[in-house]
Amino acid sequence: MKRKICALAMTLFIALFASAAFGAADAEGQGAPDAVVPDAEFQFPPTVEGDEVIHDFVIKNTGTAPLEIQKVQTG
């Protein structure tokens, strides 16, 4: 179960990052978003099956256009 949770969390993170990182420039040509993820990996500690584990991944937009995450998928 622990491995499934870790795999699910990483899949979610990769989907978020890919969606944000490959966003196109805005329609008016004013620039593009640029997603920066300072801590791209996280190792969950050992847990007992059924325990809830949570980790927040911080995504910062350093680009010149708004960063929009339009779709998130889990594995």
Image (cartoon, helix red, strand yellow):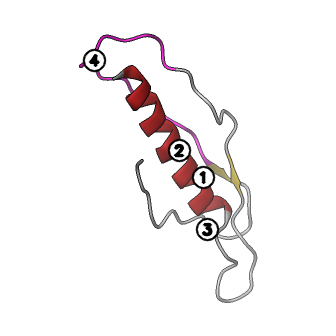
Q: Residue at x 67, y 76 (%)?
A: 24
Looking at the image, tell me whether mark 3 or mark 1 is earlier in sequence order. 1
**In which quadrant of the rendered view does residue 1 lie?**
top left
Nearer to us: label 3 or label 2: 2
| Residue located at (67% from left, 43% from top) | 37
* Residue under label 3: 66
* Disc 2 residue type (three-letter): Phe
Sequence-first tag of 3 and 4: 4
Secondary element at tag 3? loop
- Percent position (x, y) of residue 64? 74, 68
Q: Residues within 10 Å of mark 2 (few under 14, many from 20)?
A: many
Between 54 and 50, the residue placed more toward the observer is: 50
First along the sequence among labels 4 and 2: 2
Residue 23 sits inside the magenta stretch: no
Q: CA distance from mark 1 to mark 2?
A: 6 Å
Q: Quadrant of residue 3?
A: top left
Q: Which residue is mark 1?
A: 17
The location of residue 38, given as percent across then percent down, is: 70, 37
Q: Residue at x 74, y 86 (%)?
A: 29
Residue pointed to by mark 2: 13
Gap between marks 4 and 2 measured at Cα: 20 Å
Give the mark, 3 or 2, whose residue is nearer the N terminus: 2
Say which element carries label 1. Answer: helix
Please say if 4 is above or below 33: above
Instruction: Quickly name the residue at label 4.
Output: 51
In the image, residue 59 sits, relative to residue 39, either above or below, namely below
- Return the disc, 1 or 4, that comes first in the chain's sequence: 1
Q: Which residues are magenta?
A: 44-59
Mark 1 touches mark 2? (CB < 8 Å)? yes
At label 1, the amino acid type is Phe
Give the side of residue 20 with respect to residue 38, left or right.
left
